[in-house]
Structures are given as structure tokens and as C-alpha cells.
Image: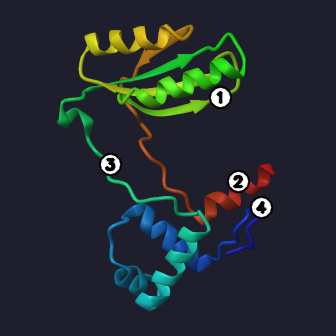
Amino acid sequence: MAHRTVPTAFEIDDVSWKILEALQHNSRQPFAEIGRKIGLSTPAVAERVHRLEEAGVITGYHVALDLAKLGIPIRVMVRRTIPGGDLQVRRTVAAIKDLTEISRCHRVTGDESFVIEANLVSIRHMEALIDKLSALGATSTSTVLSSPVQRREFSARQIEDFGRYV
């Protein structure tokens, strides 16, 4: 593979990329299995994974849940506009952190200040969440109908291709 052209704080070689790709595909597979696939010993894989964790490249391991099967069938995206400055941002962040139905929150550029993803059990639940968020400022809500891209795995080739934009 060609040298990566995207600058990073932590250089990742081809072998580490193979490990990252394997873990993204299935983070529960044993290091021994990954090692067999890429030609490393189990301790060598474990050491590389440990270094990737220490460097903050790997930030965690997660289970993906089908929330609809758990009785939480509605996903919404709420865009939140903040009229004020830093104090309003801090108030909003504090309030959002306390609302357990919110699964993700991104501070963004553009007309809105935040894009919030929430998971809800009913329309009544949605109304209650919107009321709580509206008390802090203007909101705009969309219901997610489907998610054609749930979670994308990243490969060394993609990152290399991204380099053309740097």
C-alpha cells in the first residue's frame, strides 16, 4: 500500500490497519483469530491493539442494539438553535446530558447550533422531549424513517483516498 497522505498524530502502518479493519468488522473476535488472518502472533496483535488504545485511536468497544426490538421504535433528529452565546451553549449542553433519551449530540456550524439524535417510545414521548428542548430555544425535529448507512467501517484505502482533499 502507498504511504498515507492524511496527516495524523499517530502513524498507523499496514499491519495496524489490518487489525483496525478486523476489529471494526467484529470487535469480539479473539486476537488469535486476527493474528492468523494477518500473520502475527496473538501477543503481537494484543500489543498493537494496546498501543492503538493508548494512542486514542481505538476509543472503545460497543454493542449495537436494535432499539425497536427493545420497545424504543422512534428515532428523531432535533436541530437546536441557540440565540445567545457561551452561557446558552453551556446550559444546553448540561440539559442535553441529563436527557437519557438523547443518544448523540453534535455541535455544528450553520443555522443550527446542535444536531441531536434521540430514541423514543412514543409520539407522546417525542412531544415531552421537544417541550424540554424548546424551553431552551428554537428546535426543529425530523423523524428518521430509515438509515441506509448505520455505521461505516474505515479502511486504510479510504483514509488514503481522503488525502486528496488535504
Res. 159 mark: none
Identify whether 62 is placed above or below 67: below
| Mark 4 lies on residue | 7
Q: Position of residue 79 (x, y in %)?
A: 54, 18
Res. 64 mark: 3
Q: CA distance from mark 2 to mark 4?
A: 10 Å
Mark 3: secondary structure = loop
Label 4 vs label 1, nearer the camera: 1
Three-letter code, disc 4: Pro
| Mark 2 lies on residue | 162
Residue at (49% x, 7% y) in the render: 135
Residue at (47% x, 14% y) in the render: 133
Q: Are marks 4 and 1 in contact (CB under 8 Å)?
A: no
Q: CA distance from mark 4 to mark 1?
A: 23 Å
Front in this rendered view, residue 65 or 37: 65
Mark 2: secondary structure = helix
Q: Are marks 3 and 4 in contact (CB under 8 Å)?
A: no
Q: For mark 4, does the 10 Å Cα neighbourhood hold few (<14), some (14 to 19), or many (20 or more) residues?
A: few
Identify whether 116 is placed above or below 32: above
Three-letter code, disc 2: Phe
Q: CA distance from mark 1 to mark 2?
A: 21 Å
Q: CA distance from mark 1 to mark 3?
A: 25 Å
Front in this rendered view, residue 160 or 104: 104
Residue at (51% x, 76% y) in the render: 50
| Mark 1 lies on residue | 108
Label 2 vs label 4, nearer the camera: 4
